Image (cartoon, grey):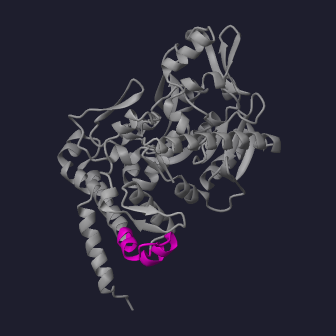
Amino acid sequence: MRRVPGLSELRRRVDAITEAADSFRVRAFFTGEKEIVEAGKFSKGEYERYLDYLLEDEFRRRLVLGVIREGEGLTIEEIAHRTGFSKLEVARHVNALRYEELVECKDDGLVITRKEEQRKVPYEKIKFIVEEGLCTGCGGCIAACPVYAITFIDEKPVIDEGKCIGCGICNIHCPRTFFPISMIRESLKGSPVNVETEGVSFFRQAYTAQTAKEKVKQVCQDGGIVTSILAYLFDKGMIDCAIGVRKADEYWRTQATLVTNLEELLGIAGTKYTVTPSVSLLEEVKRRGFRRVAVVGVPCQIHTVRKAEAYSSELLSSLGEIVALIGIFCMENFGYIALREIVENRLGVKLEDVAKFNIDKGKFFAHTKNGEERSIPVKEISMLARHACHYCPDLTNELADISVGSIGSSKGWSTVLVRTKRGEEIFEGALREGYVTANPLPDASMELLQKLAKGKRKRNLEALSERAREGKYATLVI
């Protein structure tokens, strides 16, 4: 027999529908219909599907809020029981409500509502993140903007106020407004997870690995693993394109790029050390008619895609199917002006004479085309890194399907952390088909990686806390 909802539940649902229709996101997207459709990024049908998604999502979020109001001190589990939602969905909504300052989580894990006077206007334009020095330059806001109002100028997103409709979608997709890392981490783990550590986080297998393809060995930076995995995905017809970074000129300026075959892939092999808004190319994936894409990125870029999967799945699906997220280890990144300062003024080498860069054993190396090697301790150039890097807690790209870096492996090899079920299937396929060779990562290598990862996490989370104590805006990492 079908359950008939009680009066209090019916009232809660009516309130939730009313509040959802009047929510900031729904109102902004609804009133911006003309501008959105005319901009051409989304068809009328895609616009309507996304609006339906927003309305349904806000309705369910307001149901969660209604339960919290009635209970005034409930755990995630209790809210899930009362709404019939999964714990993961409840956590997703609670995290968004925390960012909107409608609820707060107490030290004992209970969720309560906040007083009206404590709240802020949610989802303001992303330029405040730039002004606070927290922008990572990932490009997620550019891909998400429904009216092409954001462009990347001088290594930061710039909003065209004449085009902006104030919908707040850029805010939602930014990894530095709020970032629910614990929730996303739990959603990715699956079973079994063989190991979980404080610094490196969860993974299924850890390897030191090397490409088995001679063509890749000729162009790769370390072990050629990222290039080999992408080659496997292309050859097996699993992806139409991959998002990566290429050298734009001989002076080591970089440019986000879509590659569609092995030849193009080999042309972008190797590590680059300047900020590039790679995630912005998700929009180009759609525009060029591709559907299945692999994304290669540093932690902030992978964070952006994972946040979109959690909070804007309908928008993301209209841009393309994410087949794989391959994450690069990253301690910090540099702007182009900073890179020029390091190479030309600190190392005394012309940028056009550099063949490759790498970081090893605490030093930044520039290898010239005539075989010369120059280096400088990383700690002496850390202050030149992008300011936002000093607030990122993630060294090993813990939310990627497969994480790759040089720390802990010998020259010509790469350290590989296989994290998700999807990543496991891909890497095992590349092993089985002869694209890579791999050995278990030695314990000493894992200990080194763990030490460095814990150090970055502790140092940068403390920096975020210090910002909060000073009354500055600090990313809500939860």
Residue 459 vs residue 346, the one in the foreground: 459
Looking at the picture, does residue 14 appear above or below residue 219?
below
**x and y percentages locating residue 259 in the rendered image:** 50, 32
Say which residue appears at 60% left-offset and 53% top-offset. Answer: 422
Say which residue appears at 39% left-offset and 45% top-offset. Answer: 319
Residue 69 colored in magenta in the image: yes
Q: Is residue 37 left or right of residue 213?
A: left
**x and y percentages locating residue 154 in the rendered image:** 39, 23
Looking at the picture, does residue 360 appear above or below residue 467?
above
Q: Taking the image as drawn, is residue 75 in sight?
A: yes
Q: Taking the image as drawn, is residue 259 in sight?
A: no
Say which residue appears at 42% left-offset and 26% top-offset. Answer: 155
Residue 82 vs residue 289, the one in the foreground: 82
Q: Main secondary structure of the magenta part?
A: helix
**x and y percentages locating residue 174 in the rendered image:** 42, 43
Residue 239 vs residue 171, the one in the foreground: 171
Image-quadrant location for residue 192: bottom right
Residue 217 vs residue 74, the one in the foreground: 74
Which segment did they paint magenta? 64-84
**x and y percentages locating residue 431 in the rendered image:** 71, 44
